[in-house]
Every structure is written in C-alpha cells, then in structure tokens.
Amino acid sequence: MNYIYIQEAMKIGSGKVSVRGWVHRERGSNKLKFVTLRDSSNVIQCVFEQKDFEKRWDEIDHLQIEASLEITGTIKEDKRAPTGYEIHVEDYTLVGSSDKFPISKDQSVEFLADNRHLWLRSRRMIAIMKIRSTVFGAIDEYFKSSGFYEYHSPVFQAVQCEGGSTLFSVDYFGKKDVFLAQTWQLYAEPAIFALEKIYTISPSFRAEKSKTSRHLTEYWHAEMEMAWSTFKDIQDHGEKLIKHVFKKVLENNKEELKILERDISKLEPIINKPFIRMTYTEALKVLKEKHQMDVEWGKDLRTIEEEKLTSLYDVPVICTHYPKIVKAFYMMEDPKNSEVVEGCDFLASEAHGEIIGGSQREHDLEKVKQRLIAQGEDPANYEFYLDTRRYGSVPHGGFGLGVERLIKWVCGLENIKDAIAFPRTMERYKP
Ligand code: 4AD
Ligand code: MG
C-alpha cells in the first residue's frame, strides 16, 4: 500500500487514497462512526459505515482516542468536515489499540506537564514544534550563508562566564569544580584564532531559582563569535539573524501560526523595519520622559523597565553601553567612557524581554584579569582563556540568543515552557 500524508490526500481531493495516523476524535451511532484521523501533516474526518464492516463493527465501535490506524478509502470534499474533506473508509487496519487516553478537555497545567509525553500530540504542541524546527533551520542557514563555521564547545567546564550564582555543579568522579556550560563563550574565543567566524546551537544550563515565564534551567543557545569585529558588526548580525528567522517562519508556518492564533501583523515590522538602537543612558531618559519612571544610573534594567521601554515600539530595542558594573567581566570598556561597556541586550517587542546578549570583548589582558578578580574569581583558573589575549589578540565579539525565548516571541506564547518539548525548570525535571 502506498500511504500518503493527510495533507497530500486533501490536495489530491478525490478518488482512492491510503493514509495512516492516530485517532484524534471519535463519535458514532450504531450505523456510522466518525473518526478524525491525525498525522504529522493535518487531520481529516473518516467515516465508517456499519453495513460495510458488519463483522468488525465491535472493534470500530470501541476505537479509542490515539489508537493508530491505516485506512484506505475514497476522499471527497465535504464542507461540514473539520478540514473540508472526508474519507469514506473501505478498508482499515487497527495497528495499535489505545487505552483510555488520559488527556481530555480542560485539564490543569500541572496535569498536562505530568503528561507532557502525551500532550506533545496536541495540535498546539505540534504547531509549536514545527515552528521550532523552522527556527533551528533558519539560524543554521543564516550563519552558514554568512560565512560562519559551525564549531562545538564542551558542556563540562571548570569556569564560569555569566556569574557563579547560576552554575550547575556536577559530581565529576568526585571532583567538585566542574559545571555545566552556561555558554560556549570562553571556549569559542580561543577558536576564532583558527576559524575567525564561528557559531553553534547547543544546550546551555542555568541554575535559575526564579520562577518566571522566560527562564528555563536547560535551554538551547545560538551563539556566534567573530574575529576582527566592530561592536556594530555584532549588533548588525543579531538584527539580521532575527529578521531571517521571522521571515522563514512567515514563509513556512502560516498554518501553524493560525492554529496558535498568532497575530501575524505583529511579525511584519520585525522583518521590514530597522530595530531601535539606543544606549542605556538614553533608555533611562526615555523611561523618564514617556513613563515617568526613575532608574538610578548604574542599576541594571529590571523586567518591568524593559517592558515599559519596548512597549513604545513595534520592533526590538537594541540597548547598548550598559554600566560596566552590571555586565560580565569580558565586555569591552568603551574607549570614550570607561564607565560603560560595548555590550548590548536585544529587548524583544510585545514584552518578550531579552532575546540576545552580546558584546565586543575586552582584549586588554590586565583589564580582564582585574575584572575577574573583582568578581571573586581566581585568574589562575582562566589561564587557557587569558592566552587568547597573549598570542595575537584581535578585536572580536559575539552574542548568544536564547532560542526558546525567540520561539516564545515568534509564536506569541505566554510561557517559555511551551517552546520546548520537555521543559526543565527549578521544579520540573520529569518526565
Ligand atoms: O545574556 P546571556 O547570559 O549571555 C551569554 O551567555 C553570553 N556569553 C553570550 C555570548 O556572548 N556568546 O545569555 C544569552 C541569551 C539571553 O539573552 C537569553 O535570550 C538566553 O540566552 N537565556 C536564557 N533563555 C532561557 N532560560 C534562561 N535561564 C536563560 N538565560 C539566558
Ligand atoms: Mg544577558
């Protein structure tokens, strides 16, 4: 039998077809049974008539949600059917019967999380996972077509890069100074001397104790690092990357965005309009003028302030030149003002928050050492990294993009947990 996807069968639209999938919905009487069959491409209504299956009617009558079926029958247009087509079943095989499926309507968030392995089959999760697939492909495509090599860093690391408070320790054969990667960065900088322009998409780990709608403990991190960059190059690549991803999702996933009830008009400016670029100091001025909010110079922007700032625009804000004291040790001091650094946060529109963090890197060996010490680190543990400043150092920089945050934004999700199949948070690491 030549099985085709439901979507293809509907495109053919008439005649005999064979499809296979899972029972999405079922209802019936003693004469007719309606099964909505689901495969990865779509759903379709299938009708069984009792008179065609007298000997097997008991089996058909007892078909449960999520039983798997192979079906052959005649397809035709039917305006009343959920997706506009119906298959009149002529033959079928019950491949795998199903116990009573635990997920039905109106279940709590907790229940769905406990049954995540089954909830993945929902149309909502299928739509998100398809968009996620597009997003990963688009990131890859952007970097490859811009001359970046794919490069991989270790997950077990004996250094911190984004602050000790979010490190996950690992028992490494009894050794305790081993952590899961927060970022590839300290292992990426050494490689730009070999490959110049590199990128990766890989998991990063943060022991986030905060329960927010945008923090995971394990997330996928798209990072890039490049030799000879200017600070502007870093911002330009971040903006072009986001535009490319949004464009690809709009091209490939209109159906999925519809299932998620995403307002597409919100996505178009991201592709077509330049992002807003402003310094931290300018951002404080805007917050004061437009929202009467006072932020003391030198304090990091909090979520509420980021949201108020971005609510003024329909594109992201690239906020630059933060105070040195609120940013990581590796960020380049601004040559014109040593109080601020050439670091940037991309703050998404629609209150989705920080999507990208990046910077030009400090290449002065002594300054890097001093700032490590100021953060309570022993520079001796960073010798391999400091060598990047000893042997032919060049201006360079890079950024990291939180892929689930980007998916949350493009899909318009309320919580980052739905942007990944099996989310990991402080409370949840099962199933
Ligand atoms: O701003 P962050 O901490 O920057 C870095 O890790 C740099 N070393 C990246 C680089 O320059 N190569 O993290 C980068 C991005 C954030 O902007 C955010 O989108 C995402 O990673 N992120 C998280 N996403 C989900 N859950 C978390 N707990 C996240 N922490 C950071
Ligand atoms: Mg950051």
Image (cartoon, rainbow, N blue to C red):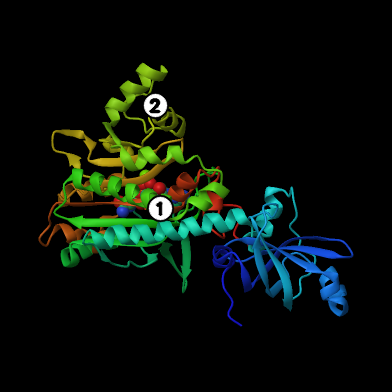
Q: Earlier in the sequence, mark 1 or mark 2?
A: 1
Mark 2 is on which residue type? Leu
Q: Secondary structure at mark 2?
A: loop
* Residue 431 seen in the current view: no
Mark 1 is on which residue type? Glu
Quadrant where the N terminus is found in the figure: bottom right
How crowded is the residue under tag 2: few (<14 C-alpha within 10 Å), some, or many (20+)? some
Q: Residue at x 43, y 48 (%)?
A: 406
How crowded is the residue under tag 1: few (<14 C-alpha within 10 Å), some, or many (20+)? few
Q: Is residue 24 left or right of residue 153?
A: right
Judge by depth and name the residue closer to the eye, 182 or 399: 399
Q: Is residue 45 left or right of residue 260?
A: right
Q: Which residue is mark 2?
A: 312
Q: Which residue is mark 1?
A: 251
Above or below for 219 versus 341:
below
The spot of residue 165 in percent (x, y) is 44, 49
Q: Residue at x 47, y 71 (%)?
A: 174
State which mark lies toward you, 1 or 2.
Answer: 1
Spatial CA span between label 1 and label 2:
27 Å
Residue 61: quarter of image: bottom right
Give the farthest residue toward the bottom.
1
Above or below for 50 versus 374:
below
Q: Is residue 315 left or right of residue 224?
A: right
The spot of residue 74 in percent (x, y) is 67, 70
Q: Secondary structure at mark 1?
A: helix
